[in-house]
Structures are given as C-alpha cells and as structure tokens.
Amino acid sequence: MNPENMMISKQQLSGFALLLFGSLLLGGCGSAPTFFEKGDSAPTNHHDLSTVPDAVPRNEPRSRYGNPKSYVVRGIRYYVKDSSEGFTQRGIASWYGTKFHGRRTSSGETYDMYAMTAAHKTLPLPTYLEVTNLRNNKRVIVKANDRGPFHPNRIIDLSYAAATRLGITASGTGLVEIRALNANNKPAPSQPLQASIQKQTAIHNMYLQVGAFSSQYNAQQLHHKLHNAAFERAKISTVNATGNTVYRVRIGPLSSVEEADQLVDQLASLGINEAHVVID
C-alpha cells in the first residue's frame, strides 16, 4: 500500500510537511505491495462482519498527504486523477488484513481491517466506491483511503471486512466492478436475496488485453508476434469508440486469475509490459 520507494518531489512538499509525509510512507499500511507480503493474513478470531455498515458517501476535502500529482513504485509512475466523477472499472480485486491493521494509510488515516475501506492506485483520496462481485452480485460501499495494489493484474485492494462481505477472502481475489460515488450519487438500496441469486446466471468473461490500436496493421503485427511466441489464443476484436474503430489484441477467455498472472509474466519476458485484465 505504501511502498518504501514511493517518491514525491520536494517541490510538492517542503519542510515539516515533507518530513511528515515521509513518516506516513514508512509507517503506512505496508512497506511493500500486499501481493509481496507473505506475512499478511485474515484474523484468527471470528468476527461477525455481516452487520458492519457500508461506508456512507459524503463530501470531504482531498487528503493533504495522499494526493501527489504522481508517484513512483517499483519503477512505474502513477498519476493521481484530478477527479473520480463518472469513474468505473472492471478487473480483479484483492484484499489485505492483519499485517497492515493499525498502520497508517497513504491518506494518513489508520487502516482498520474491520472497516469498509480500500486502496486504489490513481483515484483521489478519499473516493467512495460501490464494489460489486461479478460472480455473485454481492455489493458493498467502501472508502478508498490508501494506495495500491501494485500488482499488474489488480485494480483494488479491499479491507478484510469488505472482502468478506463480497465473498472473496477464501480465494484471495475476485472479479469486480467498481463505481465512484459522491454525496449526491448514492447507490440504490441493496436488492433482495432472491434477485441477487437470479442475477448470478450472468456470465462475465475475463481476457488479457495486450494492446489496443487505431491501426489494424499495428494490431496484426502484435497478433503475429504473439502467435509466433505460442500464444495461440490471441485474437483481434474490434469495438467502436467515439466513432472510430479500435482493434483490440486479447488472449482468452481465461479460466482463472492464476492463469492471467502467469500470462502477464510470460508476456513480460517478451518485453510486453502493458497487458491487463479486462472483463466483458
């Protein structure tokens, strides 16, 4: 969540503010991303999390220390968005627990694994998010107050409570959709259980998108490169975006998150580092 090598320019922070921000980074919810942390786990004592209330979207000022214009983690620069208005995203969620419980988050708040919070790489802090598990239609509302997860195939790190409510703690990951909320854009009340069960029949396929091009030729070149490297399931699909045709090079559909992670590692060995999971 708060890697030691996260860097902020001295022009953005000075004097006492810079020293305080440095202490937050080192004392935050983790000195390395969760997926590198072997000591993280769920609590050993049973806690009934069914009654933990969702976060309530409200108007709040941006965190003083959690919103640099950009920052670098493990050689990758991330740019913090100016606004979360209209933001939606689909991908893989992970969660973090005991190892970070009680530590400072990137925003300066204390991480509470029993509260409905989350970490995101680029959204302004705080941002309220509706998170829906695409496999079972369970839904929670969380407050994003931390940075992470710094894994190429993860879009959000959930608190233990939020992950439990969504039903992904056992597997460690889940396919989700996240949607930014504000005080004037609150979600509809949760639907009855029977309605949720009926919606479980919806099928969401997971792909690894390796590239997207306005040029069909460029897409074909990448497609040939992948096939020559034995990625035989690579395909080109098209989509209309604002009146223009976009040629997407994808591998899939994929059977699991583990398969997606393995493919990302294999592609990296070919010098292809922009692949990411998409869900249709």
Image (cartoon, grey):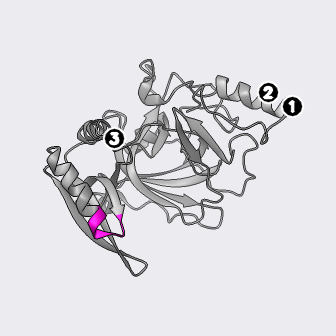
Amino acid type indicated by mark 1: Gly
Residue 130 belongs to magenta span: no
Question: Could you tell whether 72 is left or right of 19 in the image?
Answer: left
Magenta stretch bounds: 213-218
Dot 2 or dot 3: first in sequence order is 2
Of labels 3 and 1, earlier in sequence is 1
Q: In this rendering, would 65 be left or right of 275?
A: right
Q: For this rendering, which residue is in front, 39 or 53?
A: 39
Residue linked to disc 3: 271
Q: Residues within 10 Å of mark 3 (few under 14, many from 20)?
A: few
The residue shown at (15%, 47%) is 228
Disc 1 to disc 2: CB gap under 8 Å: yes
Q: Secondary structure at mark 3?
A: loop
- Can you identify the residue that label 2 sits on? 19
| Element type at mark 2 | helix
Specify the farthest residue to the right.
Answer: 15
Is label 3 or label 1 in front?
Answer: 3
Helix, strand or loop at label 1? It is: helix
Q: In the displayed structure, would residue 72 be above or below residue 186?
A: above
Q: Please determine whether, in this image, residue 196 is positioned above or below residue 1.
A: below
